[in-house]
Image: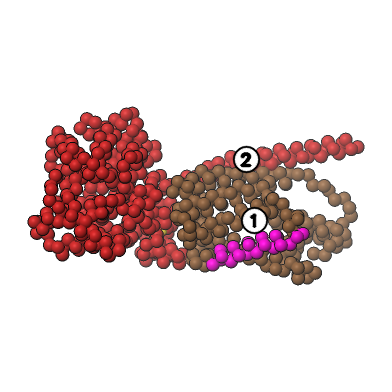
Chain colours: A brown, B red
Amino acid sequence: MELLEFARGPALTFAITVFIAGVVFRIVSLFLLWRTKDSSAGSSRERSAFSAAIREIIRRLWPQSAYKQRTLFMLINGYVFHFGLAIIVFFLLPHIVFFKDLVGLSWPSLPNNVIYAISIITIVSLIAALVMRLSNPAQRIISTFDDWFSWLVTFLPVITGVIATSHLGARYETLLGLHILSVALLLIYLPFGKLMHWFLVFVTRSQTGAHLSHRGAQL
Amino acid sequence: MNDKKTLGEMLTERGVSRRTFLKYASYTASIMALPPTAATAIAQGIANARRQSVIWLSFQECTGCTESITRAHTPSIEDLIFDFISLDYHHTLQNASGHAAEEARMQAMQENAGEYIVVVDGSVPLKDDGIYSTIAGITNLQMLEETVKDAFAVISVGSCATFGGIPGANPNPTGAVPITDIVTDKPVINISGCPPIPEAMTGTISYLLSFGSIPELDHLNRPKAFFGEAIHDRCYRRPFYERGMFAKSFDDEGARQGWCLFEVGCKGPVTYNACATLKWNGGTSFPIQSGHGCLGCSEPGFWDLGGFYKPLSTAKGDPLKWAGGAAVAGAAVGAASAIMARNKRNKILKEGK
Ligand code: SF4
């Protein structure tokens, strides 16, 4: 019970504070950086930055035919765990209740057993992503601490959540405490590694789109 | 109290039939989740036991625990007092008062040294030399230490005696502590709850009488027979929890339909007690059945768990209390780092020229 109290109280407050400070820091510092003006003449096919950005975002949703064979599984697997995570986070009632308490908004939930099934699929998918990274020599070599740790802090909340719901190994309050602590770890690390793509994914894709279009790429 | 007859002999004299007695023994065995064969052992154990001297000490408490035990269903408190135990000291239930009462306590302690059981309800204040609660001119701490010295075992009943309860809740003005903080050299059985289920109290006492030993306890010294399972695991509303059907307030359609009370603050998932199985008032009902979430009253510090009506999965306190400051600090550091990077770039560009 003390662990749960610590997790629900000081740990979560600290984690949320670091999370907010970190995310604002990253966004502000990024947007205030200078941007080198590209003075080269744009291609005749150049689109407006906005249109190029949107097109790039849409284009990246599916692999280009040249790479399809090699990347299709990775891409589908990526979709599986991204959607899985989003559904778990936003549609399990105890989570909704948490957000309602935090920001005052609430929405309908999904039954526990549906979430449970999605969690199992998500866990399998996350493990598949890890196995792929480990088994592909090129990928393994370019992987840094950030890659491994980001995977870990994403995986822990899901696995501890499932273990807590199924009452495995320890008492529920201990497992729930560990689950909340793992979420605190995720929140603390998120702004400082590649998990920042939570916020930046479409920003970076827009920038790439505008840049490519300037060079004349067909988007 | 210093009766040399066995309980069996006494019960026969009083005209308690063997059938009634066996019925009671098997009831105790069943509520304590003992195998059916234990009923015979309990019957024999009690029949051969001498009447047990019990000294009941009341400290910083509200008498709710006594109110609860007097509503015990089987065995009733009358059965217990008149047949099984000799309640030699109990503020509310004894006839004697003043000096006579204290003498009764002393006498019981002398005559049954090493054998009597001390039951305690209420917490003990330690702040300012314990002056916040005194009885017969001595502090609760003094009375506890004096009485427990020659006891066989101690049973703490109620959340005040087991975990500090209301007196121990934040900000704990009297420095209240549970009995286990003081009694460390004797077995202490904790029967928590605000109040505890009467059968948990009488059942544990009966177990001590029949087996002369302490029942199996959990990590908080509570008998596993009563505190082994979470309310949530035995709650009849559990199917609604699993299906995601929740009452959103106490008078909406969900509440009328008897759906799960998680969203209105039920602490059943982290509360260990027998309310959902033994129930209250002779098995009539229990809080969740009457439409209110579990408060978690048998768990340590339940007053300070962050609010009775706040769902368990919400943060405790206000996790956003530093959010504004965090955002401003983040923005300031972000802007500073961008400006520094710009300056550095400008400098390099200049020097390059
Ligand atoms: S009412 Fe409480 S104990 Fe019962 S299922 Fe819902 S959360 Fe669990």
At x 35%, y 48%, the residue is B221
Residue at image mark 1: A151
Whether B182 is drawn above or below B274: the answer is above
Which one is nearer the viewer's eye here, B270 or A48? Answer: B270
Q: Would residue B324 appear left or right of A113 to someone viewing this image? A: right
When asked about the image quadrant of residue B235, the answer is bottom left
Q: Position of residue A217 (x, y in %)?
A: 84, 62
The residue under label 2 is which amino acid type? Val
**Is label 2 or label 1 in front?**
1
Q: Which mark is residue B328?
A: 2
Observer able to see residue A91: yes
Subunit that carries the residue with mark 2: B
When asked about the image quadrant of residue A53, the answer is bottom right
Figure label count: 2
* Residue range highlighted in magenta: A117-138
Q: Position of residue A139 (x, y in %)?
A: 74, 59
| Secondary structure category for the residue under label 2 | helix
Q: Main secondary structure of the magenta part?
A: helix
| Secondary structure category for the residue under label 1 | helix
At x 39%, y 37%, the residue is B171
At x 37%, y 41%, the residue is B169
At x 85%, y 37%, the residue is B348
Q: Position of residue A67 (x, y in %)?
A: 78, 68
Q: Which mark is residue B281?
A: none
Q: Is mark 2 within 8 Å of ligand 1?
A: no
The residue under label 1 is which amino acid type? Trp
Query: How far separated are the C-alphas under marks 2 and 1?
Result: 30 Å
Q: Would residue B139 appear left or right of B100 to someone viewing this image? A: right
